[in-house]
Amino acid sequence: MQAIRREAPAKLNLALDILGRRKDGYHEMRMVMQTVSLCDTVAVRERAAGFTLRTNGDFLVPKGKKTLEQQAAEAFFQEAGLPMPGLEVLLEKRTPAYAGMGGGSADVAALLRILRDTRCPGMSDDQLERIGLAVGSDVPFCLRGGTALAEGRGEILTDLPPLPPCTFVICKPDFGISTPLLFAQMDGRRLTKHPDVEGMLDALRAGELAVVAGCLGNVFEEVLPPEYKDVFAIRARLMELGALNAAMSGSGPTVFGIFRRREEAETAAAALRGEYSQTYLAEPVGKLH
């Protein structure tokens, strides 16, 4: 059977605020999220039996637990009331891993879109997002895409006017940051700087790119341990290279800068690649469903 393919666009957090810890152990979030053109490709084809996952040609066999993709497929077929066939999922990875860009969640979302389109086209967007939430907090947004306000764990989504045309320079230093570590740093700490989410919403409604950029912010930056100082060095370098503003995405360590013109972004990316090989260009992407 021929494989069915879908792109899996990554996301950036234009604004990320944490309002406190909830009784269920999660944190109450308030974020403005944006889908971008940097993406993986997910392909699915049926096989005789079982579930296999390949990443850039190599079989991925997790130890002791199912992959997020298998969890998502099983949840989909259970929700649809259909028997699960044998599946082979192939991931062509381009989005950097452990980067704060939702690459894994985007892959799950693309898989769910394929299964809905081919197996249960009548399934609603709300149903699909509910399945995605059972796998990960970013999956509902990665299913929807575009520009959105994300609240709760990230699953309460409000569509926003699209970000005005611009180009992102995205730079990931060669280390990862533990998301649980950063959340733990938040607990019991009084934050002094919060992103201007309301200002960003107003600027999106007005279509004012420079004002949107001026409202970028991520509270995780305030609790980064000193060993992650490259995050701030990249942010400062992006500003020197002409970005309207720059910030860390998600729990990092990826930093992105917003540029009004593609040519300026290309020049900045070329300058950064000399020191940081994982440097990319991307544009905003609209809604996916």
Image: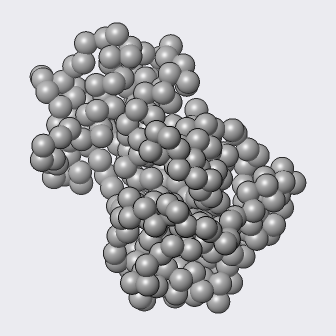
* Residue drawn at 33 percent across, 24 percent down: 75
Residue 65 position within the rendered picture, expressed as x and y whole percent measured from the top left: 17, 40
Of the pair 95 and 235, the residue shown nearer to us: 235
Q: Residue at x 37, y 36 (%)?
A: 135
Residue 179 point in image, percent of width and height = 40, 60
Can you say which quadrant of the picture contains the N terminus?
top left
Question: Hey, which residue is sitting farthest right in the picture?
Answer: 206
Q: Residue furthest top?
A: 81
Q: Is residue 203 visible?
A: yes
Is 227 left or right of 88, judged from the image as shown?
right
- Who's the residue at 38% across and 59% down the image? 180
Q: Is residue 114 above or below residue 174?
A: above
- Please name whichever residue, 78 or 178, is drawn nearer the observer in this view of the structure: 178
How is the model colour-coded? one colour
Relative image position of residue 171 (x, y in whole percent): 48, 74
Residue 96 in view, yes or no:
no
Q: How many marks?
A: 0
Residue farthest front in this picture:
188
Q: Is residue 196 above or below residue 116?
A: below
Picture coordinates of residue 129, whole percent (x, y): 50, 30
Query: If the image is split into quadrants, where does the C terminus sit?
Result: top right
